[in-house]
Structures are given as C-alpha cells and as structure tokens.
Amino acid sequence: MLICILGVYLLAVWILFYKLKIATLDLKAKIVVFAIGLGIVASFFFMAQRFAPYTKDVYVQSFVVPMASQVSGRVTTVHVKENQSVSAGDPLFQIDTEPYELAVETLRAQLVEAKQTAFANYTALAAASETVRQADSQIQQAEDNITALLAALKTSMASQTQAEAQVELDEANVERTEKLIEGNAASKQELDTRRGEVKVSKAALLKANLDVRQAETALRVGQSQLNSAIAGREVAVAQVRQIQVRVQPQKTFEEMIDRRIERKADLEKLIQSSGDESNDERSAEKLTEMKEEVVELELHLGWLREHEASVVGLKEYLQGQLPRVKSLEAQLKRAQFDLKETTVLAPSKGYASNLQLTPGAFANAGSPLLSFVDSEQTWVVAIVTENGLGLVKPGDAVEITMALYPGKVLSGEVESVVWGVGQAQGVPSGTLPKVAKTERTQKYMVRLRLDDEASDLMLRQGSTAVAAIYTEHGRMLHIIRKVQIRIQSILNYLYV
C-alpha cells in the first residue's frame, strides 16, 4: 500500500512538472519534491498504524476437541470418515461393550443377592426380636400371676392360723364344759353343743390346710412358668445378638454401652476434680457442658439397656446393611456409566478431523484418538503490535478480507483485547530468573466478532485474513485503509 501511495505521488509529480510542465525543477527542487513524497509516505505509515491498525496476521479459530474415550478397550466400529460433518450426539466410534456388559450383569446379581441376604437377616432379626417381646410379655404375666398367688397364699395361711386358733378355743370350751358338768354347773346338752363347735372348727381348719397346700402348689407352678419364660427370653436374646454380630459386629450393644459407661466415668472424674465453682466464665461453661453430657449419657444408657434386644436391633441391623447395598448400587451405576461411555459421541455440531483410527485399534482411557472441530463456535483473531493497540477498544469497527473468499470484504467489530502475553509471566522456582531477548515491539491478540453476513460462510479453522481496525480517531485515514482492504481483497485472486 505504501508503494501505491508513493507511486500515485510520483505520477502526479510527473504529470504536473514533466507532462504539463507547469514549472521547471532544478536539482534542489527535485530533492525537495522527493523529500515531500517520503514525508507523506512516512506520515501515513506512522499515523495510519496508530489510528487504523492494519495486520496481515489474522486467522480463524474454533474449538478443537481431542476426542478420547473414558474407558479402555478395543475399537469395534468407526462411524465417521475424515472431515465428515456430524451433529451433536452422533456416534464417532464404538469400543467393545462385552467386558462392560459382563461387569453390569455381575454387579446386578451381587446387588440382588445382597438385598436378599439383607431381607433374610432382617426377617430373622425381626422374628427373634418379636420372640423377645413375647417373652417379656410372658415374664410380666408370670410375675403378675406370682404376685396374685402370693397374696392368695398369704390369705390362706391367715385363714389357717385363724382356724387353728378357733379349734384350740373350741377344745378348751369342751374341757371347761366337762369340768362344769362334774360340778353340776352345766348340762350335757351344752357339752354336746361345744363338741359340735369343735367338729365345725376342725372342718374349717382342714379346709384352710387344703387351701394353703393348693396355694403353695399354684405358686410353684407360677414360679416354674416364670423360670421358663426367663429361659425363653435368654434364648431369644442370644439369637438376636448372634444375628447382630453377623450383620454388624462392630456395633453390638455391649460395645456401645461399654463406651458410654467409660465416657461417663471420665466426665464424672473431671467434674469432681473441677469442683462446683470455677474461677472464670469459660471454665464454668465447660463444667456445665460436661454435666449436661453426663445427663445425656445416663438417658442414653438407660434407653440402650431397655431396648438392647428389641427394636434397636432392627435399627442397628439396617444401619449395618445399607452401606453394603449402597456400595453395590454405586458400583452398578459406575459400571452402567462405563458401558454407556463405550460409545463416543460428538459433543456438538462439527467435523471429525485427523482421523487415524480403524477397527481393531486399542483405545486407552483419556488418550485422544481423533480431533473434533466445533463448527458452531468460530471467531477471528488478529495479531496487532502494541504501538498500534493504544487506541483500540471493544466495539471499534473492523473490516477483514480472507484469502478463502477473494473479492469479499467482511465487516465486524472488536470483541475483546487480550490483557497480557506469556513473556511477562513469572514461574515460581528455586532459581533466579533468566532474561531472554525479546522483540522491541510486543504483539497482542485482538478477538474480532463478524457481522451476521459472515454466518452463511464456511470459516475454516486456521484460515488466514487481513484486517483493518478503525478507532475513533483519525477518521480521514480510515478512507485510505478501506481502499487498502479492498485492493487486498482483489489481490487475493492472484495469490494466497
């Protein structure tokens, strides 16, 4: 472009001074005219690059995704060809599914078995716990029965004592009446009456003795029933504890109770050593917390002892079984995920590129097997020297011409300007920094956004272009840049 400007200037000088001969130029005038031309060219060069930066270092960018499988295996099918257009979700290649299907089936079987085992143990534990509850009920009934039998025995023995006393009294009356008869102080009829009373009282004593023996027999039977109920409960408790140890040995009631007893004893020692009064507020709060924890431990211990072989057994059992089932469920989900990942899908609309994959190749998890070019997200990057970057800001108008589309000028605007470059980035290390030789002028990336007219064009990854950025300053120079861009668009027909 500079050569063109200089050529136009020299052509004008030739026409004016040599063709039309409006004036005669001596050597000094020729030097002045040539210096003016160089000044014009230099002024344009410095001012245009400042107010309307121009760069040939422009290219199209898009996301390039290295496609790799998340699982390892042998490739069985390749669904795409080199540079084939695909949509999001289309299969790219397939890894052998057989090992992953077997893993899924195995885990499903293990999960079913674990649930069946859990249900069987739960049923056994529930039955044993119900037996314990029934035994507790039988023991309570037996104890209530014994209490009633003891009361009946006590009543019978009191009746027996009363009957014995009545017999002794009646016999004494008979003896006294006999002595009175000897002294003619009583009649024989009165003696017969006294003897009849003795017979009645002895009959009552006999019945009282019988009631006592029956009450004692019933008490022995009741005691036997109580002993039998206690023995049955002990057997049921042993069964519950056996199942608890099998399904969750680390959390048996004995261990929980022992740990809480130890903790309670330690807290009580600390409370005793601290005393009832503390010197500061913090110590007093700590003492209060320890006392509250002791109360909670006492309540918990009482609750554990009360429910040691019943409902808590079911709760502890479920807590012990769920982790096993949950673990298998998580493993099954992972195996199903791995099976799904044997089919590698396109992440978006785009093209499969650098395809060097064939059925039979072994795919390692995480190792890229082809490149995928995203065609939905494409942008243009211009590399601008820092002396032309001072006035550039987002929103400035842009024109570009691409070698891919000769004769076409595309409009757009500056989307963003990169904040920094890697040459100034320090890396933490144990050595002193080395000063590398750098260019006098640094270059920065400017990201461009094209107008909607470019959406119909196929902008290939890596395509080159020439761009001019029009800042808000030096608008007269924008005309020259626009001419320059259009000349470049035509020259694109001649060379790449």
Image (spheres, rainbow, N blue to C red):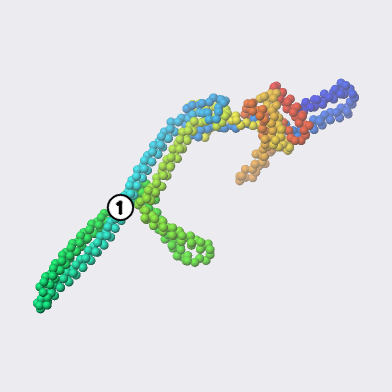
Q: From where the camera sits, is residue 354 visible?
A: no
Q: State whether residue 458 is above or below residue 330.
A: above
Left or right of 35? Residue 146 is: left
Q: From where the camera sits, is residue 394 visible?
A: yes
**Which of 24 and 182 lies nearest the eye of the viewer?**
182
Q: State whether residue 2 is above or below residue 234.
A: above
| Residue 336 drawn at (x, y percent) | 45, 35
Q: Quadrant of residue 300?
A: bottom left
Residue visible at 82% across and 23% down in the picture: 11
Residue visible at 11% across and 71% down in the picture: 189
Left or right of 140? Residue 333 is: right
Q: Amino acid at mark 1?
A: Ala
User: Which residue is situated farthest in the top direction here?
Assistant: 19
**Which of 172 and 278 lies nearest the eye of the viewer?**
172
Residue visible at 44% across and 63% down in the picture: 269
> Crowding at label 1, few (<14), some or many (≥20) Cα neighbours within 10 Å?
many
Quadrant of the image containing the N terminus: top right
Circle 1 is placed at which residue position? Answer: 135
Left or right of 472? Residue 316 is: left
Residue visible at 45% across and 58% down in the picture: 293
Q: Quadrant of residue 496?
A: top right
Q: State whether residue 118 is above or below residue 235.
A: above
Left or right of 183? Residue 413 is: right
| Residue 239 drawn at (x, y percent) | 32, 49
**Which of 386 and 249 lies nearest the eye of the viewer?**
249
Q: Quadrant of residue 192?
A: bottom left
| Residue 358 drawn at (x, y percent) | 50, 26
| Residue 286 drawn at (x, y percent) | 50, 61
**Which of 153 and 398 lies nearest the eye of the viewer?**
153
Label 1 residue SS:
helix
